[in-house]
Amino acid sequence: MGKQLTVGDEAPALVLPTADGTTVDLADLRGQHVVVYFYPKAGTSGCTTEACDFQESLEPLKAAGYAVVGVSPDPAEALTDFAAANGLTFPLVSDTSKETIDAWGALGEKVKDGKTVLGVIRSTVVVDPDGRVELAAYDVAPVGHVADLRRQLALA
């Protein structure tokens, strides 16, 4: 499993398919801040809450120069439905192999239904305009996380 990123690390590559059939390449977003958040499964209550919170904060984030990208192991088709059902207008990308999720330190052991499993750890990494980690938060709660993030970025 990949190590969790820390402030100052170079952000790993991220080139993944989106819900609408295009590709997001982090290198194409150089020059702006990018909030990359990792979530376990589209359509679940916690992931829906978090995605909707990001959508509600999208305009203030954009106004401050931040792009938002959501990453999950769901197939692209599931992301299309998830985005449509929740009115999400930022890119959701599919990492079915979990290679990118692992490279960003968001794959690890967690307890689910009383069993230890390998899965996606809800995480957010903010990348600066030069491609370096500006902020990294792992094992975040779905409720209230976006508000906390906005405070940390002085956008509250």
Image: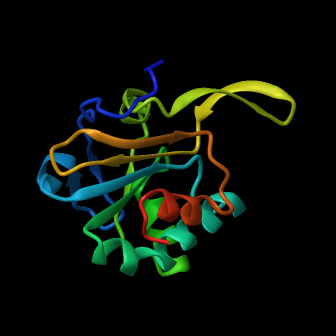
Q: Residue at x 60, y 58 (%)?
A: 145
Q: Quarter of the image holding residue 24?
A: bottom left
Q: Is residue 117 left or right of residue 5?
A: right
Residue 127 versus residue 57 in the image, above or below: above
Residue 116 versus residue 138 in the image, above or below: above
Residue most extreme to the right = 114
Q: Pinpoint residue 1: horizontal percent, then vertical percent.
A: 48, 18
Q: Pinpoint residue 118: horizontal percent, then vertical percent.
A: 63, 26
Residue 131 versus residue 63 in the image, above or below: above
Q: Quarter of the image holding residue 20?
A: bottom left
Q: Pinpoint residue 66: horizontal percent, then vertical percent.
A: 30, 65
Q: Is residue 94 left or right of residue 27?
A: right
Q: Residue at x 17, y 56 (%)?
A: 29
Applied colour scheme: rainbow
| Closest to the observer, 75 or 152 | 152
Q: Quarter of the image holding residue 103?
A: top left
Residue 150 versus residue 93 in the image, above or below: below
Q: Is residue 130 left or right of residue 125?
A: left
Residue most extreme to the front = 154
Q: Residue at x 58, y 46 (%)?
A: 40
Count up the numbered dots.
0
Q: Is residue 114 left or right of residue 138?
A: right
Q: Residue at x 55, y 63 (%)?
A: 146
Q: Pinpoint residue 122: horizontal percent, then vertical percent.
A: 58, 44
